[in-house]
Image: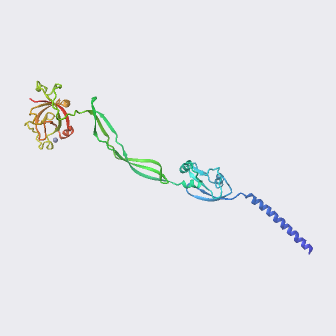
Amino acid sequence: MVKKNMECHSKRKVIFIAVILVFFLGAGVIAGSLEPINNIKIAFSNNHEINILTTKTTVEEILKENHIELLEDEMVLPSLTSNVSQNDTIKILKKSESNTIATLAAKGENIELEELLKAYSPIVEKIVVERVEIPYETITKDVSNGNSNTTEKVVQAGRNGIKEVTYKIKYQNEIEIERLEISSKVIQEPVNKVVNVQTKETVTSRSSISRTTYTVPTGGLSNEVRGITPKVTTLNASAYCACYKCCGKSTGTTASGKQATAWYTVAAGSGYPLGTIIYVPALSGNANGGWFVVQDRGGAISNNHIDIFVGSHSEALQFGRRNLECYIYVK
Ligand SMILES: [Zn+2]
């Protein structure tokens, strides 16, 4: 019995030692993994997320452990050397997407990583077509022939054109952050404004009548008026042709019975007898030298007005209405 007891005792001893050994070995193993195990979330730039368990503490180590390499256009938050702890998130961003976050951080506000990540939102691209005005240009023409007494006259009004522009616009948080013009198409060309710098027309009131100083003209009908003192006055001049619109008939026959001659025949009021010769200095550049003969009458023609017979209706319209100085030679 005693012996048997002894055997039992030594068996217990072996078991005890074994248990002790196992304990120490186990303790050694446990001692090797005494660092805390943290649950870390890694969020990728494509919005994909993974949760990992790690004993590593820096961002760089954790990425390495999980075989994650940053691409050239990627960055990581927090930075590679930062420490992370339980339930932290490591966010991998495209560098372009980090601008908003950088802007927020630059405001000096105390923004935690979580808030920074909330500020991140994907960039949305849209194709947008907009109508844009093309401003007209103003062209100034000097037609004053060096005259110093000039005035500006708008001969053609300007009008803006329209073009259709296609943009590629990037939005983040519904705010436009980038705009790129892809193409544009002119819908309507602009019309340039044309301004003439011209000699000021002498505005003479109807009450101002004749004056006595004048330059004696030469050429044209000057031989026929030799010795006659002209009445020099400003008349309102227009032009007409032989058409139905101008005359109500289209025969070209004048009140004097003579056939009308372009740039020679004028219609004048009854104050000027038929056959009166009129010299217009401003029209001396024409083939007739500026000389006209009163050969016609008109219902609407007063003594302050002459109507010059021209070759075509368009020429008559182009002449318009002008105040012109006239030398009137009544025979
Ligand atoms: Zn006409």
Residue farthest to the left, as pictured: 257
Residue farthest to the front, as pictured: 207
Which quadrant of the picture is home to ligand 1? top left
Which quadrant holds residue 259?
top left
Colouring of the image: rainbow
Picture coordinates of residue 131, whole percent (x, y): 38, 49
Drawn side of residue 248 relative to residue 164, left or right? left
Which quadrant holds residue 155?
top left
Picture coordinates of residue 19, whole percent (x, y): 81, 65
Note whether 13 is above or below 205 in the view shown. below
State whether residue 143 appears in this view: no
| Quarter the C terminus occupies | top left
State whether residue 92 appears in this view: yes
Viewer-proximal residue among 257 and 208: 208
Drawn side of residue 105 relative to residue 194, left or right? right
Residue under the image location 45 percent in, 50 percent down: 168
Picture coordinates of residue 36, whole percent (x, y): 70, 58
Drawn side of residue 239 relative to residue 36, left or right? left
Note whether 309 is above or below 215 in the view shown. below
Which quadrant holds residue 261?
top left
Residue under the image location 13 percent in, 26 percent down: 222
Residue under the image location 18 percent in, 41 percent down: 313
Residue under the image location 74 percent in, 57 percent down: 32
